[in-house]
Amino acid sequence: MPQLPAPDYPADVRARLEADAQEVIARYPDSRSALLPLLHLVQSEEGHVSRTGMRFCAEMLELTTAEVTAVATFYTMYRRKPSGDYQVGVCTNTLCAVMGGDAIFEELKEHLGVGNNETTEDGKVTLEHIECNAACDFAPVVMVNWEFFDNQTPQTAKKLVDDLRAGKQVSPTRGAPLCTYKETARILAGFPDERPGVVEASGGAGPASLIGLRLARGEAAPARVVHPRGEAPRDTPPHEPPPGEHLSSHDAPQQTSASDPDHPAGPVAEEGE
């Protein structure tokens, strides 16, 4: 049966969103180009893109709801149903899967009692498997609201989601401090993140990611980026990285997620055991 027209936002919410939407639309020579950030804007209001949100975007951009729906259902960053404060994505693409991403995803499903794209009963965590996040040198990778948690294991990942649900402060391996999914959506809509220090904290490519660029520039390569297990690079003690160096998971074991700094990543047994 055809659905009834989507209800509108309450008057005060509508007025606030209209002011924000006009600011976004003014950035583009063609108003329909503002559709992607406007979808993030309405997602920041409800935590997902509702029928009301799609109606709002269509009206602001003079599009049909069918045109808006076609875009909102194409991109996976737009949620079509209520979701958690923290979107926990486990990369299950080739390298992350080989390095343990599949095991992490399966254990998190059991640990949280949810399936793919499902949310815990407390509304804190939505779990999903995701495709490559261009962080293969730190595999396996978990992302929380699009911030990186590198070199994860099932144990560190379970502690990570437990800390999120308990309201504890959790810091990404690199990048800006975490905020809620709604707050993240507003930033993706193009509004500044005004928290102190977040601009300086953003970015954070590790040495393994930048080695090709450094070689292209003619810079001297480090002695090793990846070394056999049990053999320490340079003159450092076994399993201890040089100061300031962010090793990849292939240099396991090492410290990983800030939520569990005492738990090393990767296999700890010698090969063949």
Image (cartoon, rainbow, N blue to C red):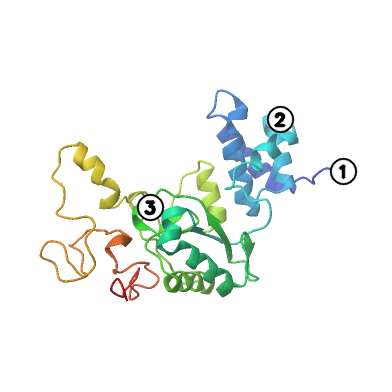
Q: Is residue 50 above or below residue 218?
A: below
Name the N-terminal-most of marks 1 and 2: 1
Q: Residue at x 66, y 48 (%)?
A: 49
The residue carrying mark 3 is: 136
- 273 left or right, relative to 226: right
User: How far is mark 1 from mark 3, CA to CA?
Assistant: 45 Å
User: Which residue type carries mark 2?
Assistant: Leu
Give the secondary structure at mark 2. Answer: loop
User: Which residue type carries mark 3?
Assistant: Cys
Viewer-closest of 82 and 217: 217
Give the secondary structure at mark 1. Answer: loop
Q: Is residue 27 above or below residue 182?
A: above
Q: Picture coordinates of residue 7 (x, y %)?
A: 80, 46
Give the secondary structure at mark 3. Answer: helix
- Report if residue 141 is visible in the image: no
- 66 left or right, relative to 22: right
Viewer-closest of 114 and 266: 266
Q: Quadrant of the C terminus?
A: bottom left
Kindly identify which numbered label has been placed on residue 63: 2
Q: Residue at x 60, y 44 (%)?
A: 41
Crowding near pointer 3: few (<14 within 10 Å), some, many (20+)?
many
Q: Is residue 105 above or below residue 4?
A: below
- Quarter-wise, where is residue 2 in the image? top right
The residue carrying mark 1 is: 2
Name the N-terminal-most of marks 3 and 2: 2
User: Which residue type carries mark 1?
Assistant: Pro
Q: Picture coordinates of residue 32 (x, y %)?
A: 62, 29
